[in-house]
Amino acid sequence: MDLGTSENDSVVTEFVLLGLTETPVLRPVLFVIFLLAYITTVGGNFSILAAIRTEPKLHTPMYFFLGNLSVLDVGCISVTVPAMLKHFLRQDRSIPYRACISQLFFFHLLAGTDCFLLTVMAYDRYLAICQPLTYTTRMGWGIQQVLVGMSYLFSFSNALTHTVALSTLNFCGPNVINHFYCDLPQLFQLSCSSTQLNEHLLFVAAAFMGVAPLVLIAVSYAHVVVAVLRIRSAEGRKKAFSTCGSHLTVVGIFYGTGVFSYMRLGSVEASDKDKGIGILNTVISPMLNPLIYSLRNPDVQGALRQVFLRR
């Protein structure tokens, strides 16, 4: 354990991430699996971005938000997986205190922006289906930029608050984190000072960034369902629901894993389960999002074919 005095009165100057396994034989196998997952995620999301940029039919608010979601997915997996890949290849699995705090900040910045952006996308679907006559004016280019900018701003404020509050805690040892990246619940367990304020902040953040967006998404889609059921044409109802199905799938995966990650604060026994949930949240979800949004969308499929054929 590397101990010393730091600027924030913390004794521990580095942490040790146990990662996914301590079995040496499994590390090369896991390295290949997660390297392929990382390449697939980055390639898939950048392909979505290229398709949106090159196909005029995709120059709409919905795909502008989807493009931003792809950027967030690339950022989210890049915050956690490259460090994990490095630890698979090295015996030294330590991470400096400042690097751990930085990883936590960027993870909460990107994941928090995801929360707000998924809410914005639900609002976009509500306007498109329930208010089609005023959609173009109520979702103009300037409004799109403001909505995305506010999503980043709110998430930045939340991530900065947690980071500053965490930096006031003392870590006297042990310094072993039973996870593959630095996150709040695991760091709370290692602190030798009171984490009551931090847990209260996390509870408030969960209400503001988790419950409130989820309620807004549910209300938006409740109006969408009522509006779609009024459509007499079966083909029209199918088309309207298809534009929302992909988004609802992504919302379910994102919020499902998020709830399980933070609902069991202080539970040491849940650490190994948290690793599996962390993989779903930081690896599987960003990797599946391009597939989910393109699988039942002929416009995206056509644009992707054009991107690859041009290459």
Image (cartoon, rainbow, N blue to C red):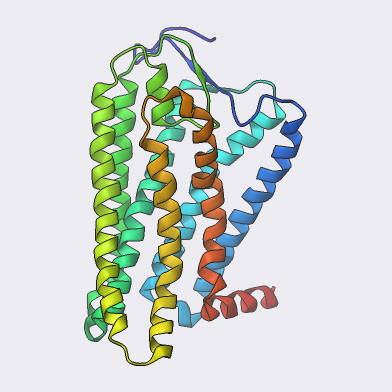
Q: Is residue 62 above or below residue 170?
A: below
**Count of numbered circles on the image:** 0
Evaluate whether residue 85 shows in this view: yes
Name the residue at 26% across, 69% down: 222
Tell me, yes or no, if residue 143 can be seen here. Answer: no
Residue 111 lies left or right of residue 96; in this view the side is left
What residue sits 56% from the left and 71% below the top? 295
The picture quadrant where one finds residue 227 is bottom left
| Residue extending farthest bottom | 233
Spot occupied by residue 143 in the image (x, y as percentages of width and height): 26, 68
Q: Residue furthest top?
A: 4
- How far across and down, in percent of the image, does residue 178 sit? 53, 24
Residue under the point 29% across and 55% down: 214
User: In the figure, residue 108 lies in which quadrant?
Assistant: top left
Answer above or below: position of 291 versus 265: below
Q: Quadrant of residue 5?
A: top left
**Relative image position of residue 283 (x, y in whole percent):** 56, 47
Q: Pick whichever, 221 or 63, lies toward us.
A: 221
Q: Quadrant of the C terminus?
A: bottom right
- Residue 268 vs residue 29, the one in the foreground: 268
Instruction: From the top left corner, tell me how far across and down residue 54 is, in percent.
Output: 54, 76
| Residue closer to the observer: 182 or 223 | 223
Q: Report the quarter where the N terminus lies.
A: top right
Determine the residue positioned at 50% across, 40% down.
Answer: 278
